[in-house]
Image: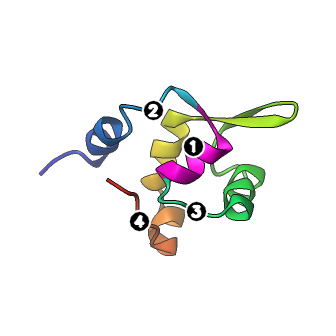
Amino acid sequence: MENPRKRYVQQFKKYPDVVSVLTFREMLGGIGDSFARKLIRDGLVKDIFIKPHYWIFKESIIDYVLSEDYAERRLKVRV
């Protein structure tokens, strides 16, 4: 059976190591802006705030899609 982390690393290979909120939303299948910012505020993904933008680490996004919170919400990641 394939390692889920490796699968997401491969799936997100085209994205840079740090992404904008817009790209983060795209990576999670087109989630809304408010929900993306809630994930950032709640500390579910690691970010850097450089006024006026949030930048999210790709590794943190992979950690999130492998988390229980993600599984409970049943979000779909686009391939």
Q: Which residue is mark 2?
A: 15
Q: Which residue is mark 1?
A: 23
Quadrant position of residue 33: bottom right
Q: Hey, what amino acid is under mark 4?
A: Lys
The reply to whether callout 2 and callout 4 are in contact (CB within 8 Å) is no
Q: Earlier in the sequence, mark 2 or mark 3?
A: 2
Q: Residue at x 63, y 46 (%)?
A: 22
Q: Earlier in the sequence, mark 1 or mark 2?
A: 2
Magenta portion: prevailing SS class: helix
Q: Which residue is mark 3?
A: 31
Q: Mark 4 or 1, which is nearer the eye?
A: 1
Q: Hey, what amino acid is under mark 1?
A: Thr
Q: Which mark is residue 76?
A: 4
Q: Position of residue 9 (x, y in %)?
A: 34, 36
In the depicted view, which residue is nearer to us: 28 or 62?
28
Q: Hey, what amino acid is under mark 3?
A: Ile
Q: Earlier in the sequence, mark 4 or mark 1?
A: 1
CA–CA distance between discs 2 and 3? 17 Å
Q: Find the magenta span and give its range.
A: 19-27
The vertical placement of 9 against 73, above or below, is above
Q: Residue at x 42, y 53 (%)?
A: 66
Q: Secondary structure at mark 3?
A: loop
